[in-house]
Image (cartoon, rainbow, N blue to C red):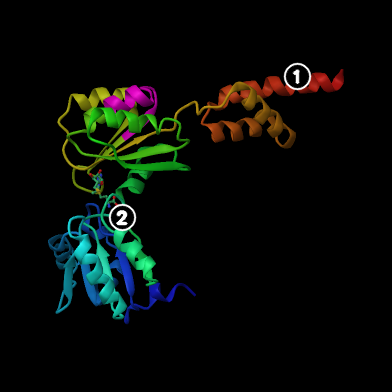
Amino acid sequence: MGNPKATDLSTLEPGLYLIATPIGAARDITLRALDILSTADVLAAEDTRTLRKLMDIHGVALRDRKLISLHDHNARHAIPKLIAALNAGKSVAYASDAGTPLISDPGYDLTRAVIEAGLPLVSAPGPTAAITALTLSGLPADSFFFAGFLPAKIGRRKTALGGLKSVPGTLIFYESPKRAAGMLRDAAEVLGAERQAALCREITKKFEEILRGTLGDLARDVAKRDLKGEIVVLVGRGDSVEINQADLEDEIKAALKEASVRDAADQIAAKYGLKKRDVYQRALALNALEQDSETE
Ligand code: SAM
C-alpha cells in the first residue's frame, strides 16, 4: 500500500502540499498535482496570477477557495496565515511560479514553519529545470551538485566557482541570459577551459536549445550571441580531484587485493574523477611490481 495521502484525493487530509508545476510545457503538470489543486481547502502561490492561469489551462476551478500569495517579500505575514489554516485542520497547496518549490524558489521558510509546528508536509513531485537539464546535458548524472544562481558580481562569482572546483560530480547552475556569457568566461578561467559543459536553454519550450562542448568552446560561442530565455549551465567533473600520488598508489594497491587490474582502475578513476586510462596504467605497473616481489 502506498502513502494514503498519495492515493485518496477525494478527501485531502490536512497538511501542506508542495506542488511542482511545469517549467514550460503546460501539460507537464502531474495528475496528482491537478487532483490536489482541485481538492485543497486553501491554495497558496508565489504568484497567484500564474497559478490561476495554470488552473484555467487545466480546467481546475478556484470556486470559493482562498488563494493566498506567498513570496520572499510577504513571508512574514503570509506564513502565519497558512500555519493558522493548517492548525484549523485545512489542507493547503503551495506552488511557486515554475518547477519545484524551494529549488531557487520560495517555500523553504514555509516548510520549516510547518515542520517546527509538527504539521504534516507532503510533496507532489514534478518538473525541475536542474534535473531536466542534467538528463539532457550528456554529462555524468551519477553524482551532481546543484549550485543554484552564482553571485552577479565578478569577484564573488569567481570565488564561488573556486569553491566548487573539486566537487566530484557534475555542477548545475541556474543563470540569467544576460549573465550567461560572463559566467561561462569565468567558469572557463576558474574551473578549466577543457572541462566538458552544457548550456540548456528554454527546456520543454518552443525554442529549446542544448549547447554541448568544453567550457572554453561554450564561452567563445555564447560571447558572440544574444541569448534569450531561461538557462541552466552544467559543468562536468574536473579530471583531477586533489589526491596525492602516494595516497593514490595506496588506494590502487588496496583495490588490487580485491579486484582485477581493470576493475580496480575503474573504481578508483570513478571515485576521484581521474582518467581511466591513466589509473589503469598505474595499476598495471603496481600489479607487475607486486607479482615480481612475490616471485623473488
Ligand atoms: N523552481 C524552479 C525549478 O524547479 O527549476 C527554478 C526557479 S528559478 C527562479 C528560475 C531559473 O530556473 C531560471 O532562471 C533558469 O535558470 C531555470 N529554469 C527554469 N525553467 C527553465 C527552462 N524551461 N529552461 C531552462 N532553464 C529553466
Does the image show residue 218?
Answer: no
Tell me, yes or no, whether the two marked residues, 1 and 2, touch with CB atoms within 8 Å: no
Is 96 within the magenta? Answer: no
Q: Residue at (39%, 26%) from the top-left corner?
A: 195
In the displayed structure, does residue 93 sit left or right of residue 226? Answer: right
Q: CA distance from mark 1 to mark 2?
A: 54 Å
**1 vs 2, front mark:** 2
Residue type at mark 2: give it. Leu
Q: Residue 194 appears at what percent x and percent y?
A: 39, 22
Amino acid at the residue labelled 1: Leu
Question: Number of callouts in the render?
Answer: 2
Q: Position of residue 163 (x, y in %)?
A: 39, 32
> What residue is disc 2 on?
102
Task: Name the residue beneath numbered marker 1.
Answer: 289
Q: Earlier in the sequence, mark 1 or mark 2?
A: 2
Q: Position of residue 20 (x, y in %)?
A: 29, 60
Q: Which mark is residue 41?
A: none
- Relative vertical location of residue 126 with respect to residue 290 in this rendering, above or below: below
Q: Dot 1, how many residues are within 10 Å of its Cα: few (below 14), some (14-19), or many (20+)?
A: few
Label 2 neighbour load within 10 Å: few <14, some 14-19, many 20+: some
In depth, the one of 263 and 111 nearer the eye is 111
Mark 2 Cβ and ligand 1 under 8 Å apart? yes
Q: Is residue 295 visible?
A: yes
Q: Quadrant of the C terminus?
A: top right
Residue numbers of the magenta segment:
184-198
Q: Is residue 29 above or below residue 153?
A: below
Closer to the camera, 22 or 88? Answer: 88
Q: Quadrant of residue 151?
A: top left
Q: Secondary structure at mark 2?
A: loop
